[in-house]
Amino acid sequence: MKFVLFIKILILTSLLLSGCSESDDSIQNPGGGGSSMQLIKIDSGYAAGSKAIVSLYRDQALKTGYNKIYAALYDSVTGAVITNADVTLLPLMDMGSMVHSAPLENPDNTLLENKWFDGAIIFIMPSDSLLKWKIEVHVRNLSAAGNPEGIAYFGSIDVMNDDKKYKTFNASSGSRIYLSYIKPNSPVVGINDFEYTIHKKSSMMDYPPDDSFICEVYPWMPSMGHGSPNNVNPVSIGNGHYNGDVNFTMTGDWQLKVYIQKNGIKDSTYFELDF
Amino acid sequence: MKSFLTLIFLIILQTGVSDLLKSQSKIEGMVYSENTGEPLSGVSLFTDDNNKTPIGKTDENGKFVLENIKKSTVSIKFKRVGYSQKIVELSGSIKINKVYLAEELPESEEIIVNDNLYDNNLALNNFYMTSDLNSIDELISKTPGMTVIKRGNYASEPVIRGMNSDRINVTIDGMKIQSACTDKMDPVTSYAETNNLKSISVSKGAFSKDDCASTCSSIDMKLKDAETENKLTLNGNINGGYLSVSNGAKVDGSFNLKSRSFGNNLSLSYRTSGDYKDGSGNEVFHSGYNKVNLTNSSLFRADDKNSFKAIVIYDYAWDIGYPALTMDVKDAEAFITGIQFNSKDISKLIKDLEAKVYFNKINHVMDDSQRDNRIKMDMPGWTDTKGAYIDSRLNAGNMNFGVKAEFSELNANAEMTMYPPGASPMYMVTWPDVNKDELSLSINTGRMIGSNLRVDLGVRAFGINSKVNSEIGYSELKIFYPEFSGEDSRFLGNVYMNVGTGLWNSMTAGINYSYSKRNLTISEQYAFYIFNRLDSYDYIGNPYLKNESSNQLELNLNYDADNFRLENSLFGYFFGDYIVGKVDSALSPMTENSNGVKIYTNIPSAVIMGFEQTADIKISEKIRLINNIQYTYGRENNDKYLPQMPPLMGTLSGRYTADKYLLQGEAVWAASQNKINADYGETGTPSFLVFNLRSSINLFDLFTLDAGIENIFDVNYYEHLDWQKIPRPGRNLYIAINTEF
């Protein structure tokens, strides 16, 4: 343990001194360079035709709701990290009688952080022993001549059920909507930055974000029957994301009651936290 | 014990007077101010049983001559406006008897607990301290102008003229102590015991230098001193008693070791009490308690001028019930220690000096294991206080000054964990690890102007810095005060002026005035959802509160004649930025069944007015009556009444003293209180009248037996300040036996 700590300090120190070191830790960072992210590899696959190998990562166990997905691209011949590419994700659930996708956020290739293509998938149902999720990663390799394209396939993906931080219902305004909790990831007593997404269903394959709701949030402690004061109601910050402040006066079981309103019609749901 | 001493005192008196008439001689002497050394003119001399006709007076040079004295030594009482009266043994064999009178600190009332003092309070002492079983709470509640808030049968919160403990600075031997319970279940008075106290000094306003550090009024519990004596002696007393109403008992002992340069006083006590029964014979559940106290005071006298004193107190109480609250206390533990250095006649300038370093620590654990609350809770609190002061008396020309500098640092922590059935425990910080540093400097002076007017002046300045150390606690406060930096500094001050004058022979008058800014309490500034059972609101502190100010005015008119003494006080305290809890209806309460949330807020003004009167009538050598009446009236600026104001109330006690025994009857009464404020959950309280009968008898000159019946007629009553209208104890038979060795 002490050794690990020592290494961490060493890395941190070298970072501070050099700004960027030539680390080779591909788990931490596909292109080298320090990162505090601890990512877990889902799998690697060749996006046939694109001259790129895709490695797919997650930051925690995949579950229903909002999941960050990280892709690293390597040249299939040299193994060099590719940073110039268009990457899009396509989650798929084949239920036999039908196939559907899920709300998602594609990586923005102009905003590569530490050479990761990071996006998000909001899984709308859990997997089971028979039904697994698939993720297709479409790559257009802009660093190779002719900008070749290809798809890497990742199958048999397990998604757990998390009905505390993911809610879906038919809104009174008509469409099926999906609320996915993002943060606080580690809630604390005091003020917390609160963020979630709202997506709606347009078709089995299309789940666009919806920025047009007026939202309110009320933290609630069900075991005692009280709320908390001075919360800031979430407002849309674009791309289906809503951001506000929630205050917790103590640790324990909390509900975050979220009211969403459109055209004067209000619906409510709640996220559940325990810390 | 006290009764026994009175007996002896009266016997000495009688023999003293008869001796006075026998021999013939002349006694001469001079009277000086102990503070300035100046000769004092106009001092009246009395034989110590006669207050009416002086037998002599000092001239303009402070000199007195007593002719026709029939004994070689006599006991003479010296009285002068502005000075504490003193009884001195004068001898004809000494050419010039020198007598020093100390300047009286105005408006500091001493409840003598265990000291053999020959002064006119002796009659009151007996009244206050009727038996060794009395608790400090009982003594305080018997003092004119004082009452207590009761939440149970233990650790009552003292109230002075309607001001609760937020406005009272309670110290033990001058040492500051911070109570550790957020719900005021452990006022500082609960960490001492009657048998280790010499006296309780009460200042009902900010009128004197020692008190009123940064509050409106103060209580200092003075510990019994260790003493030195030329030959090695060991003495002390052992006492034990029983109370029927609560199946309670107390045993205690005090042991004095005295030698030439070293003295030690060790006091030990143990009290236990079961649930008591009220006037209807119903058991008041959760009202029992247990307590041990160990106090040791050591004195080392280096020489005539320099001495050291060391104090250690360990007080532990357990399984304390609070019937008016939803929780009890599992443990309340205090460790209090201090070292003091005293020196006198250091130089021409420095007359005397006292320096002290102290430290104390309190652990307080509330619990509800004996209650059937749906959600069980743990609410521990712990505090510690370190401090030091230098207090000196300086002489410059014919002026004298008292100068005191003090530094203290207290730390207060409290938290709460709730265990809801089937859910995660809930944790919150209720006092966020607050560090509070206080630095103060006070200067006071006083002198006679002419022969009949005394003026005292004082100023005090203090700087206070408080800091929130708990990260969680700080995050909690930020919910309400997002801009709060976690630190707060204040500069405060107070001034006072007292004027006293003799009107004519037996009558004196005084005016005391002070302006003070009060220190904020930890709760007022930093409380986080602290539940108050009185109004059933959760309270939240406010770091930005303004300090409450007060203009305090007191008029005293005293008449002191041979067989009749009358003390009258009329007071008005005019507060600015008075601090109350104000409902914030936007907030949802935390505590189950709570009515809502209140935030500590300044209201523009409030006023408390009232009076106290004590009449002391000596009907004969053997019969004496003492009557106390007090009244308090409080209003907020919005014309609503201030909550928790005692009604018109009083005590009439009559005592018959014979050679070997004493009988005392008491009528304790209070008028109904309907001047209430429903915003604080108050409802009216009916009047009551309760009778007590007490006796004390000396057995074989070895033991004193105190016995009595309290609440003779088993009246079911409660006082207005008692929370939740929990009835007071019903008929109680007590018996106590004391022996001295």
Image (tube, rainbow, N blue to C red):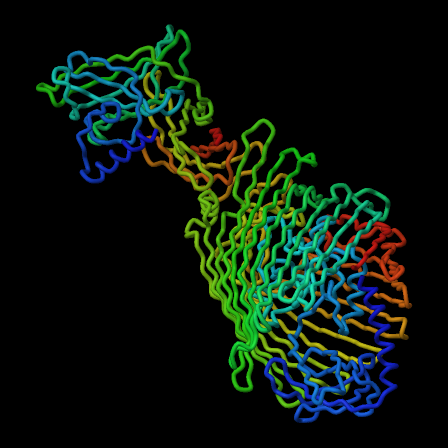
Q: Nearest the camera: B660 or A166?
A: B660
Judge left or right: residue B405 versus residue B710: left
Q: Position of residue A19 (x, y in %)?
A: 19, 38
Q: Position of residue A58 (x, y in %)?
A: 32, 22
Above/below status of A24 relative to B444: above
User: Residue B12 sits in which quadrant?
Assistant: bottom right
Q: Nearest the camera: B273 or B283?
A: B273
Judge left or right: residue A120 versus residue B655: left
The residue at 75%/87% (across/down) is: B93
In the displayed image of the protein, which residue is found farthest to the bottom? B60
User: Residue A135 sits in which quadrant?
Assistant: top left
Q: Position of residue B571 (x, y in %)?
A: 68, 72
The residue at 17%/26% (across/down) is: A83
Q: Nearest the camera: B398 or A84?
A: B398
Q: Position of residue B489 (x, y in %)?
A: 45, 60
Q: Quadrant of the C terminus of chain B?
A: bottom right
Q: Nearest the camera: A89 or B590?
A: B590
The residue at 58%/32% (across/down) is: A223
Residue B639 appears in the picture as rendered: no
In the displayed image of the protein, which residue is found farthest to the left? A145
Above/below status of B440 relative to B376: below
Above/below status of B712 relative to A62: below
Q: Quadrant of the N terminus of chain B?
A: bottom right
